[in-house]
Image (spheres, grey):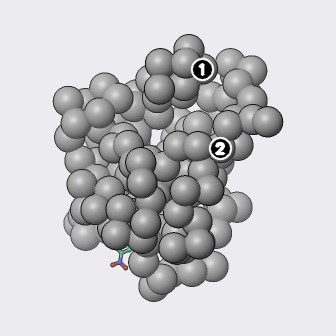
């Protein structure tokens, strides 16, 4: 069975949708057979499309995330995925509180364990390209590590 990887942030409208989009595209490019999804621990935006600036920065990098819709990571999801990846430390804590035994942090795969900053409160588009770049690098390193049985 193919391994499942879920990226989790707070709202599932800014950061984890980018991670999902980058991961799905990279899997196609590399021929990796992983099941990729994303979710948020919060419920404010369920059913919504990703935020405009995330769609825009992803599109600028040839990744289409416009069809994604926000879903929530709940207790029921805990320990059902092979790899659960939080985008920042508070996401990791929230995921653990829901009963997930093992959680990884995306920034550990290329950015010295740094948090991927929450762009929801950014003023406009500025900063979204930095967030994309961070996610892009770390997601690809993560998938390569999983493919090489390093995780
Ligand atoms: P995300 O950003 O976790 O990257 O999707 C956020 C989106 C919405 C909220 C917070 C963060 N919110 O509080 O509604």
Question: What quarter of the picture does the N terminus occupy?
Answer: top right
Cα separation, mark 1 vs mark 2, equals: 12 Å
Check the image and report above or below for 107 versus 103.
above
* First in sequence: mark 1 vs mark 2: 2
Q: Which mark is residue 63?
A: none
- Looking at the image, the residue that sits furthest to the bottom is 44
Q: Secondary structure at mark 1?
A: helix
- Looking at the image, the residue that sits furthest to the right is 1
Disc 1 crowd rating (10 Å Cα; few below 14, some 14-19, many 20+) is some
Which residue appears at 47% of the width and 26% of the height? 151
Which residue appears at 57% of the width and 80% of the height? 46
Check the image and report above or below for 123 versus 56.
below
User: Would you name the residue on which mark 1 appears?
Assistant: 147
Instruction: Tell me if residue 49 can be seen.
Output: no
**In the displayed structure, does residue 1 sit left or right of residue 113?**
right
**In the displayed structure, does residue 98 sit left or right of residue 77?**
left
Q: Position of residue 44 (x, y in %)?
A: 45, 85
Which residue appears at 74% of the width and 21% of the height? 31
Check the image and report above or below for 98 versus 28.
below
User: Would you name the residue on which mark 2 appears?
Assistant: 4
- Total tally of numbered discs in the picture: 2
The image quadrant of residue 69 is bottom right
Q: Quadrant of ligand 1?
A: bottom left
Which residue appears at 25% of the width and 30% of the height? 111
């Amino acid at each position: 069975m193919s391994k499942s990887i879920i990226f989790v942030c707070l709202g599932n409208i800014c950061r984890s949708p980018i991670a999902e989009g980058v991961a799905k595209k990279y899997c196609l490019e590399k021929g990796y057979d992983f099941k990729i999804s994303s979710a948020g621990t919060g419920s404010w935006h369920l059913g919504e499309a990703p935020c405009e600036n995330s769609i825009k920065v992803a599109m600028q990098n040839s990744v289409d995330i416009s069809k994604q819709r926000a879903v929530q990571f709940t207790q029921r999801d805990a320990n059902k995925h092979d790899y659960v990846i939080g985008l920042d430390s508070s996401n990791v804590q929230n995921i653990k509180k829901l009963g997930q035994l093992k959680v990884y942090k995306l920034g550990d795969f290329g950015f010295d364990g740094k948090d991927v900053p929450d762009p929801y409160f950014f003023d406009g588009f500025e900063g979204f390209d930095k967030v994309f770049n961070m996610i892009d690098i770390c997601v690809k390193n993560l998938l390569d590590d999983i493919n090489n049985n390093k995780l």
